[in-house]
Amino acid sequence: MHETVEQSMLFKHLQLVRTKPRIYIGGHDVGLLSANLYGWKAHRYHVPDNDPWAGHFYENFHKFVASKYGERRKVDWHNVIRAQEVDARKQLVLFYDLLAEFCEDYAP
C-alpha cells in the first residue's frame, strides 16, 4: 500500500471504524459509515487537512464502486454495496474489501 494512504487521517479513521464499528459509527450498517464519511467531508470543506488520499477517496470511490458493479443509476456507493449484499455485517466487510482494492490502485 502506498505510504500516502497509510498516512491519511481518513484512512486511519476507517481502520479504527473497522475494528469497532458500533463505537465509531453506531453499528455495522454501511449507511452509518456513509453518513460518518459525509460528516468528515463537510469538516474537510471548512478545515482543509492537506490529505491527498482523502481527496482521491471522495472524488473517486463512488465511481470505482459503481464501475465495478455496472451501476448506472444515481445512487451513492453505500446503496450499490447494499444491492450486492443484504446482511449489514457483510456489507461492511464488502466495503473494506472494496476499499483495499481501491487503495491498491492509488498513485499520487
Image (tube, rainbow, N blue to C red):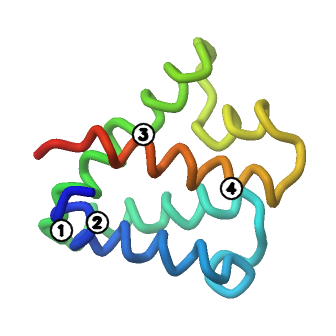
Which badge, 1 or 4, comes first in the chain's sequence? 1
Give the residue type that dot 3 points to: Phe
Q: Residues within 10 Å of mark 3 (few under 14, many from 20)?
A: some
Residues marked 2 and 3 touching at CB (< 8 Å): no
Q: Is residue 102 left or right of residue 21?
A: left
Secondary structure under the numbered disc 3 in the rendered image: helix
Q: CA distance from mark 4 to mark 3?
A: 16 Å
Q: Nearer the viewer, residue 19 or 30?
A: 19
Q: Is residue 89 left or right of residue 96?
A: right
| Disc number lying in front (4 or 2) | 4
Residue drawn at 68 percent across, 76 percent down? 21
Q: CA distance from mark 1 to mark 4?
A: 29 Å
Residue drawn at 48 percent across, 66 percent down? 39
| Residue on which disc 4 sits | 93
- All told, the count of numbered labels is 4
Which badge, 2 or 3, comes first in the chain's sequence? 2
Residue drawn at 69 percent across, 63 percent down? 32
Which badge, 4 or 3, comes first in the chain's sequence? 3
| Disc number lying in front (3 or 1) | 3
Residues marked 4 and 2 touching at CB (< 8 Å): no
Numbered mark located on residue 61 in the image: 3
Residues marked 2 and 1 touching at CB (< 8 Å): yes
Numbered mark located on residue 48 in the image: 1
| Residue on which disc 2 sits | 44
Secondary structure under the numbered disc 1 in the rendered image: loop
Q: Residues within 10 Å of mark 4 (few under 14, many from 20)?
A: some
Q: Nearer the viewer, residue 51 or 2?
A: 2
